[in-house]
Amino acid sequence: MSLNSIVIAGAGHAGVQVALSLRQEGYAGRIALVNDEPWLPYQRPPLSKAYLLGKIDATAMQFRPAQFYIDQGIELVADRGAAIDRQNRRLLLASGQALDYDHLVLATGAHNRPLNVPGATLGGVFGLKTRADAEALAPLLAQARRVVVIGAGFIGLEFAAVAAAAGAAVEVLELGERPMARAVSPQMSALFRAAHEAWGVNFRFRTAVSEIEGDNGRAVAVLASDGERLAADLVVYGIGVVPNVALALEAGLTIDNGITVDANLLSSDPHISALGDVASFPCLQNGERLTRLESVQNAVDQGRLIAARLAGKPAPYTALPWFWTDQGKLKLQIAGLAMGADNHVVLGDSAAQQVSVLCFAGERLLAVESCGRIGDHMAARKILARPPALTPAVAAAPGFELKTWEAQNR
């Protein structure tokens, strides 16, 4: 079937990649990219780090300058998808206008899970997801002396490191028993906990927020579940995200922790694809169970795959997941998915903050976490992309080097 018009709802990493890759694949039809933010599409990872610190400006975060979209014939539509008319293949916009499509791509992303406690709407309380969040937060961070961070995941810890570097006293409240518990091994958690504590960050684990106390409409303290009252000039929370499925749900698409798609990233409507943070797909590395991944790599790789399919080159999505987070001077890189790991082999020197943790389930290597060992990360991506023969016994042998083993076992 000839596709004369492709509409992409969402202009984050996923949506922009679909548009760029369509042109790279030679697609010559109409591309409309619906962007619900008031600026050119931009990268999000710098928001909690370099942009917040003023090390880069907004222009440096842009995927492409405005002229690029004009030159490529990519229509930037400053609007928001409000409803999908599947029968007539139209995306209805919040402005009242509509876009006809032969194929619709939903790249609607996710939003911050709300902080449902008294005082959460006070001034000085922030989630950190968009450029608008960062721009509102930056001037307050420069003045804050006491900062409370709620949640010890990637975003929370990235911000905690920035706040500590800016000279603030930082308290991190976390319901779990260790930092990044849902994402990394106990060994890597311990390394990052020690690093943050050395930077002046104080952790309170197994601790929730009972209330945020205000004065004249602004947050002044966080009341913790352990009974402590933590004075705060600024409160930042990162307690996970919720996929933006409302558009798909109202249109009757199948939803299961995101928009359910098949191995080709097609939704339950063959004229609609979904990808990135909003899509729940059968993940090869997770036993083909429906999985929703929040990563730039996943958004980019899925964008390329959808563009290739729409250009006549279909293939199932099999890309290896990988992730990263920059916290202070440390970079953590993760290849694979460690869910179900029951055995860990540690390589390197924790004291030097140069460590790789190999995560196994039985004899099977699931993932490799690397801090300060970029070569290990690159080797791990190659090893995990093919049926590996690496076992815990081999990895635990004295003198074992992951890069060397990968080179010898290609």
Image: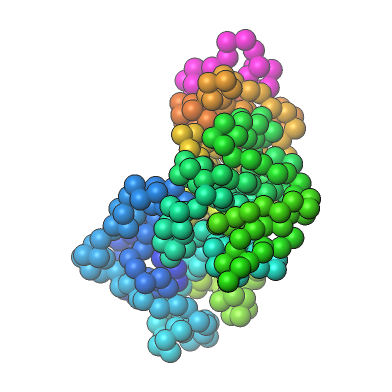
Most distant residue in the front direction: 216
Could you tell me residue 201's position as x and y percent? 59, 40
Q: Residue at x 40, y 49 (%)?
A: 53
Q: Residue 175 lies in magenta, yes or no?
A: no
Q: Residue at x 46, y 84 (%)?
A: 94
First to last magenta residue range: 391-410
Q: Nearer the viewer, residue 287 or 76?
A: 76
The answer to whether residue 35 is visible is yes
Q: Nearer the viewer, residue 79 or 212?
A: 212
| Numbered circles on residues, count | 0
Task: State left or right for residue 264 relative to residue 222.
Answer: left
The answer to whether residue 314 is visible is no
> Is residue 285 depicted above or below 348 in this figure?
below
Q: Quadrant of residue 216?
A: bottom right
Task: State left or right for residue 111 relative to residue 74.
Answer: right
Q: Residue at x 54, y 35 (%)?
A: 199
Could you tell me residue 42's position as x and y percent? 37, 59
Could you tell me residue 303's position as x and y percent? 44, 57
Most distant residue in the bottom direction: 96
Most distant residue in the top direction: 398
> Is residue 310 depicted above or below 385 in this figure?
below
- The colour scheme of the drawn protein is rainbow
Could you tell me residue 139's position as x and y percent? 41, 58
Q: Quadrant of residue 98?
A: bottom left
Q: Residue at x 53, y 21 (%)?
A: 352
User: Where, quadrant-wise, is the N terminus in this rendering?
Assistant: bottom left
Q: Nearer the viewer, residue 117 or 390?
A: 117
> Is residue 83 depicted above or below 59 in this figure?
below
